[in-house]
Amino acid sequence: MQDQERPWTAFYGPSVRKTIDAPQYRTIGDFISATADVYGDLPAFTACLPNGMNGTLTYRQADEMSDAMAVYLREVAGLNAGDRVAIQLPNGLSYPIAAMGIFKAGCVLVNINPLYTAEEMVKQFKDAEPKAIFIVDMFADKLAEAVKEFAIPTVIVTRVAEYLPAMPKAIVGLVQKYWDKTIHPITIPHIRLPDAVDAGRMSKKTLDKGLEAYRSMIDPDDVACLQYTGGTTGVSKGAMLTHTNILMNMEQTMELIPNLDKGKEVALTALPLYHIFAFTVNFLGFYSIGAHNILIPNPRPLSNLKRAFENYKITWMSGVNTLFNGLNGEVWFQDTPPKHLKFASAGGMALQSVVAERWEAVTGKSVLEGYGLTESSPVLTFNPFGKTRLNSIGVPLPSTDLKCVDEDGKDVPQGEPGELIAKGPQIMKGYWNKPEETAKTIQNGWLLTGDIGVMDEDGYFRVVDRKKDMILVSGFNVYPNEIEDVIAAHPGVEEVAVIGVPDGASGEAVKAFIVKRDETLNKDAVRAYCKEHLTAYKVPKTVEFREELPKSNVGKILRKDLRAEELSKAEG
Amino acid sequence: MVGPLEQAILALMIFVIMLGMGASLTPRDFTLALKRPYGLMIGVVSQYGFMPLIGFILASTLPVSDPIKIGILIMACMPGGTTSNIFTYFSKGNLALSVLMTVTSTVFGVILIPIVLVVYAGALDLDIPRENIIATLVLLLVPVAIGMVLRKFNSNVGAVTEFMGSMLAIFFILFLIVSWIPRNWEFLLTTTWATYFGSVVLGLFGFALGYGFSILLKLHPRNARTVALETGIQNGPLAIAIIAFTFAGTEAQAIMAVPVLYSLFIVITSTMVTLWFRRVNTANEQPLPNGLL
């Protein structure tokens, strides 16, 4: 595409490169070491627990410890370049040591949701075939179950309070063991993470060549991460993200985030790092500018974030709609919003306009919405600072092309809805072991997102909805997002999800699931409110009140679970 | 009844408990309290309006000696105890409100406790060493301030201190049971029923009035439970410390009987109230996602 075909570049800031030809580094390992040399003794990561207890690693420490971890993986555990290593950890100081160690060893990182059941773990193990795994002690009992089905030779166990000072570490350990009772005896052979680091340090002394040797064996286009996703067709697949994919996406995204003071930013990471957005932007992106990253092991309940906001001068945070909505409702947050915050960024799911507006009213700062998919490492678009448009996912990143196409793959006229397809250096290599799925998703170099979008005349995009979430009411397309946005603006509503349910007369009917904020809210009031703001066919035919809505571990509301419930009800 | 060693241990415990309370605070918490004067008002009214009044009525109607009357009054005028936060948690109350009420009643106590005490003691014709009490209360703000500074200086030291403080509040009860009861059997057996009655009923009336007051103000049941527990549960260790530091000899020993008995029985009554709250109130309750009050 030529420049004139990327109208959105006009909205980039003056210092923003319109295209980025190649990443600054060959591999993620090179990037990590080189960055650590620049920021040395600045704090890189702080794990902050709900009670305020915390531990910190500097850039130099994280670099040295992950060097040792890389040596451990290669020399002691006997892994080779390209071997998969799983990480099943909540946010904490072990995460960067493990992840950076894996990259430096030339191995492939496989993020696994720590809350997965043994059964789900087995499925992912069988597909990715990891040779080693990092796991937190709280979940080691599930691993003991899972390895019966798929054996993993090297198991490295860590704890939530790993590398915290002795007293807090002891207190957290005792509370977890005797009060929460979340730690069970570990029955499988394993090594503790600090012991693995020590073993790696010992082994490193006997190494005749430096760690560069591991990295030189891999190519920038080799896979760095297998990032699993439900994807556009439902089956869990591992997206193969290369070193170039991830490094480029990190650079592309940081390029569009202005006013960053290198070595001075403080980022709050409440999203789990195993989520690709937190991984690329929070973990690597903010590492690249020398930021101090505050890692929250468990953001639920939201009061767990209170100490982090009190104790650190947070300048930047990322989140999903649910997180912003929740914080908007917390009294302590309303009364003392973070003073030093420059802005927040949202991704992962549609940001409701009422949530964005309330956030701005509470904090005085804007939420910049971005958009992307696991398959695109993940960021494709972002709202340029100061030129934010509500309800818009912003403009494509440098060197990224995005367009809307119809069922036949032909471009739709500007302003018309069509499936979003994307091209750029951040698009994955394909799905692991699933060439057919890859062929369905990447066509002629374009990634089919499965989302319906619209481009305005300036090149700003708006996501209308997921293609498969679209509801067909008597031949009309109804997009759940639009209805959710309206209902969410009702003051009596805490949360809402809208789906299509089978309906004899019209094929499908709109159904809304609502969590009340105001106890007196009733169904008629909701429908009346919708009638004021929506065309008749979009008004939910049925409304159901719930105590809570099904959510993914990053807080994304799961419409598919609600749909499955409705379908099983319909089938009796 | 309380020897010099025990006094020293008590003083140290109080110091750490107050240090812990300080470490849980930032200047933000005070802005928060001032921004929500409604919660503050309820806390102050129930803590320094109702409780001292209950104490006064008990002291003036029960057939007890002067030292016991002073004990009842002092106990009634204390700020909320940190254990109320624990019971609030278990009764599914509003933890943020509980902490806020404990903190504000402690801070405002420096001014309000002496005033209330002097007024009621005057009405009962009792002699209270006012200056000493003020001095003790002011002195107690020192560890609170140190706690706040500790946290600012090092968040880990702050968090550990806070944890230790809340643990000690529980340990304090154990300390009484293990150290004080075995050596004071005789006292416990010879104490009149009226002293027992006053010590136990003070807390119970506190729960009832706090709850009634909240229902009257149409607070959410969750907040009503919190206010009830917060009102009934007083800072026992603080009362003992004040008595130990401001009275002397046998008089001090006699006065101290009330807070000691109160502290022992409040654990039992709070547990019962908490169990009752859990059973009766939480069944069909809507969740309260939003707001302190």
Image: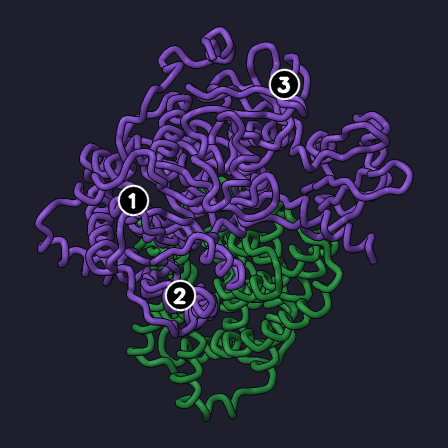
Chain colours: A purple, B green
Which residue is at a point 46% across and 93% down the rendered structure image? B186
Q: Where does label 2 land, which residue?
A: A151
Residue A547 falls left or right of residue A8:
right
Q: Local crowd at mark 3 within 10 Å, few (<14), some, or many (≥20)?
A: few
Q: Where does label 3 land, which residue?
A: A410
Question: Element at badge 1?
Answer: helix
Seen as rendered, the residue at the extreme top is A4
The disc placed on residue A510 is none
Q: Amino acid at mark 3?
A: Lys
Q: Where does label 1 land, which residue?
A: A103
Residue A204 in the image: x percent, y percent? Answer: 13, 53
Which residue is at a point 82% across and 43% down the rendered structure image? A502
Residue A364 in the image: x percent, y percent? Answer: 51, 26
Q: Is residue A159 above or below residue A298?
A: below
Q: Amino acid at mark 1?
A: Phe
Foreground disc of the pair 1, 3: 3
Separation (CA) of disc 1 from disc 3: 40 Å
Sequence-earlier tag: 1 or 2: 1
Q: Local crowd at mark 2 within 10 Å, few (<14), some, or many (≥20)?
A: some
Residue A306 falls left or right of residue A359:
left
Q: Are marks 1 and 3 on the same chain?
A: yes
Which residue is at a point 39% across and 89% down the rendered structure image? B183
Q: Which chain contains the residue that carries disc 1?
A: A
Q: Which chain contains the residue that carries disc 2?
A: A
